[in-house]
Image: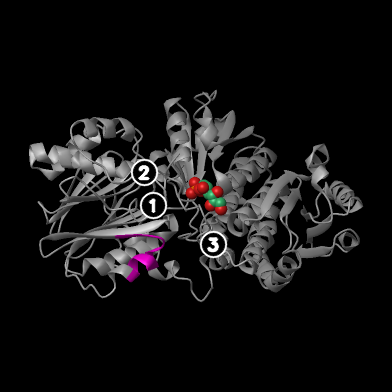
Amino acid sequence: MCGIVGYIGERQAVDVLVNGLKRLEYRGYDSAGLSIISDSNLITYKKQGKVADLETIIEGKNHRSNIGIAHTRWATHGAPSDVNAHPHRDNSGRISIVHNGIIENYGLLKKALIKRGYSFHTETDTEVLAVLIGAFYEQTKNLELSVRKALSEVVGTFGLLVLSLDEPDRIIAARRGSPMVLGIGDGEYIIASDATAIIQYTKQVIYLSDNEMAIVSKDNFATKTIDNIETNNQIHQIEFDLEELEKGGFEHFMLKEIHEQPYTIQNAYKGRLIADKGNVKLGGLRNVADKLRNAKRIIFTACGTSWHSALVGEYMLEQLAGVPVEVEYASEFRYRNPVLYPDDIVFAISQSGETADTLAAVYEAKQKGCTVLGIVNVVGSSIARETEAGIYIHAGPEIGVASTKAFTSQVMVLALVALYLGRMKNLSQLDGKRIASEIIQLPDKINQILARCEDIKQIAKKYIYAKNILYLGRGYNFPVALEGALKLKEISYIHAEGYPAAEMKHGPIALIDENMPVVFIATKDEIYHKIISNIEEVRARGGKVIAIATEGDTQIKQFANDVFYIPETLPMLTPILSVVPLQLLAYFFAKELGRPIDQPRNLAKSVTVE
Ligand code: F6R
């Protein structure tokens, strides 16, 4: 949420900053802006709207500058507008900052500063921080010290970059609760909210920790805690390539990411699944294997799509490992004094590894003495670093705001965890081998679904009139119903709800009429005949039925208006297949309606605010 980038080196800063903003735009697109120092002037451009709108106002200006900071905004305090766009300045006009996060006590700080004669021109919490830094600078004449003093008064979260005309050869970066990565180039540095803005220039990075600062000049950098204790950071290598950040011929990132799934789920099990032994090797869990084996209970905590994959994980772990599992919304978990025991294992699941609620749940569970593990996509992210151990899903950068490939890769990794734990307990080798052999067929089966994506497009066209759509599934397909509905809501703005199919008769059935299409995920399993009864209940009330069914199921054609077939697999692995047509359905609905698919309104990737 909000993307920030800073540059210092030999290149034209404006070019690097604008490139960086384009890479980070998926984190927020309410406004964009940048500040540079050029010929001893601090120059700022900012504009409501997208980075492309910012480009129109800087076009042809040709400022020469080798240092600057920039921001793309997802509005929290203050409506999206030119004036509320970052960067923000202090009262002297000589200090400029960009900020990702929320200053919770900005109201109090603002009042105190106004009393001291300072003035404000925006509604943002960030301007308060800029003015506060400026106020300290008047006393200290030392930028680093002023930033440190200001941050010690701040309650809340920040990823912060500070630029000053009085110290024009450095950028000061700081973080608490919002990510910050320092890219180390050859005589240049790029500092950004995530590595996507950096990789074009260097693959060498440092991930700043919470309460850490970096003081970066052209030739060197120093890191220290906000209370001035020097820190030593390991240099990491970015694992993905620049091409992974391009659309690769697809019209949208979301469509590209849907099509990447045969490959990304393979990446999730490659080197981990020992198919001929029906076993799994999870290096990341090696040191906690005994704790896992002895856990009385496993708790998954996550938000949104990741919460849906946690639900699938719950069913898998209970089925294969016979261990009680609970699934918690991270946003609720921390605020309700959850009853946790030291022998509970808590898994935090997150694509970005930066979701504020999930991170807070990690801290809460750690505080209560639990073993906290991560299932994360973004390498080096906060959740990856704050958890004791974990498993990367290796899905590569997910740019489309609506999560797709991360879901299937999370479910894949959860299947591996279930198999791993199951085999430590009572699951037979024969069963393990059967599951493994089904897993390795999944990429090919997803390809078979993708090859028929035109059929889904036709279904979307047929039901484009719908204002509401219900998604129903049972067992392993219940979380898929939730996920299908979420995808549709997010990118098409059509209202959709997911329900366990049998719950329909307890209320939602009142909504059914000829204008209310119902998507049933009705694949063959032991409760198939029950879902057929639910379909009949909908048809009896004039509802239109779109069924996702198992290949070879001819019976379902009598009950459904439209059927999309997916290849057969084990029920526990079905979500990895059944979600794909639903991702495509949401995509084609949104496309038909002309929605901005990769950047849906009001949303942003990586929700780093509570
Ligand atoms: C939905 C979506 C969100 C995220 C949620 C958690 O398409 O992207 O619901 O799943 O914000 O994000 P992560 O997984 O990054 O913690």
- List the residue tagged with mark 1: 2
Mark 1 and mark 2 residues within 8 Å of each other at the beta carbon: yes
Residue 101 marker: 2
- The reply to whether residue 281 is visible in this rendering is no
* Residue drawn 39% across the image and 45% down it: 78
Q: Which residues are magenta?
A: 46-56
The earlier-in-sequence mark between 1 and 2 is 1
Say what amino acid the circle numbered 1 marks.
Cys
* Residue drawn 41% across the image and 61% down it: 49
Say what amino acid the circle numbered 2 marks.
Gly
Please tell me which residue lies in front, 117 or 291.
117
The earlier-in-sequence mark between 2 and 3 is 2
The earlier-in-sequence mark between 1 and 3 is 1
* Quadrant of the drawing holding the C terminus: top left
Task: Say if disc 3 is inside 8 Å of ligand 1.
Answer: no
- Residue 439: % across, % down: 64, 57
- List the residue tagged with mark 3: 264
